[in-house]
Amino acid sequence: MGVKSFVEVHPDSHFPIENLPYGVFKPEPGSEPRPGVAIGEYVLDLSVISSAGLFDGPVLKGSDCFHQPNLNKFLEMGRPAWKEARTTTQKLLSLTEPALCNNASLRQKALVPMDKVQMLLPIAIGDYTDFFSSMHHAKNCGTIFRGPENPIPPNWFHLPIAYHGRASSIVISGTDIVRPRGQGYPSGSSAPYFGPSRKLDFELEMAAVVGPGNELGKPVDVNEAADHIFGLVLMNDWSARDIQAWEYVPLGPFLGKSFGTTVSPWIVTLDALEPFICDAPKQVPPPLPYLAEKISKNYDISLEVRIKPAGQEHSFVVTRSNFNHLYWTLTQQLAHHTVNGCNLRPGDLLGTGTISGPEPESYGCLLELTWNGEKQLPLAETSRKFLEDGDEVIISGYSKGEGYKVGFGTCAGKILPSLP
């Protein structure tokens, strides 16, 4: 786009002026949460910008959406408000606009060093749905549990499979995760095992943040679904594989998933990701008419997972994948979610499911990387089959432009021992 910011931004930063992702933060302990956008190593306090009367466009003028403790009111306003806010913030942060650049006192109030703030969940999440949209992940899981003859059930190629998750246990990056307890598969004729999970895993995912919802009973057209998606976050949908394997028949995931889901603090908008649109995979058989898109698109987002083993100073890359490996698109997921009349609401979260690529080094969870514990994953002087207490998992992701990155920061969490 060629716009330069007066805020110095390192070329490797995830947060150049081309990005401007949204989050919610506290500038200091005890202060009220408020919305902001990331620029370099700073957070632009949108409540200060709003109070200064600088959101003066026809949609946002007079609105109190940036004086809220979360982004839900802004999300509900839809794409006209999002575009106006993006245009305004890019202009205010540019070298050629004096309103902020040349106003020292306003600059000091509005730009807060990122290392001084506390990041919070940016949205109030009413409902959370987790999809199962990576063909490579589906094939690997099916092969592990059912054998290679027919690893993917026939319905998977006709609809985006999903389940309704637990919104109350979604936490912001940096929150510790307590190892869950539950039942595991019985050995022989013995009773089921009960205790701390022995197969704790991460899942490399992303999640769409819903903007305007839809009325109960009124589905969203697949070709209009993008107007209901504000942006994307990184997500780690932690999984207790042993608990999940014992409980999931016949109704699906429950305690093996609901103990914790971690999301990154910054929501990268679809507008910021637009330069990185790429073709979605060819779908065979062709989807039913309600899922048939005029233009079927994915995004080129490089994803990486690192594990920092307990007691070690360094972290190690365990997988590199890409968002473009998803078979079912974000818009197909949203359209399918509403086709029965289900009403989505601003702030709802739609997880993609584990994003695995075709190669072993691109598998998106330890279940695949160790083939359900059949082999060890080397980490320098140690190795893992599944996560151990004290291990930290760090997910990162970005799209690479010419001389800049549009990134998501990190999504991190450390495993604490199970409660006694």
Image (cartoon, rainbow, N blue to C red):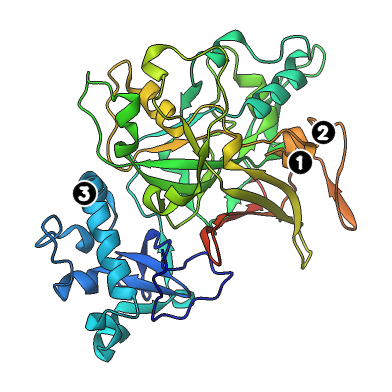
Residue farthest to the right, as pictured? 381
- x then y, percent, for residue 415: 65, 51
Judging by the rendered image, the residue that carries numbered circle 3 is 80
Numbered disc total:
3
The amino acid marked with disc number 3 is: Pro
**Marks 3/1: CA–CA distance:** 45 Å
The amino acid marked with disc number 2 is: Gly
Q: Are marks 2 and 1 in contact (CB under 8 Å)?
A: yes
Judging by the rendered image, the residue that carries numbered circle 2 is 373
**Which corner quadrant of the image does residue 135 belong to?**
top right
- Residue at image coords 52%, 40%: 278
**Which corner quadrant of the image does residue 25 belong to?**
bottom left
The amino acid marked with disc number 1 is: Phe
* Residue 391 at least partly seen: no
Foreground mark, 3 or 2, reads: 3
Image quadrant holding the C terminus, namely top right
Q: Secondary structure at mark 2?
A: loop
Tell me the number on the disc at residue 386: 1
Q: Secondary structure at mark 1?
A: loop
- The local crowd at label 2, few if under 14, some if 14 to 19, many if 20 or more residues have their Cα within 10 Å, is some
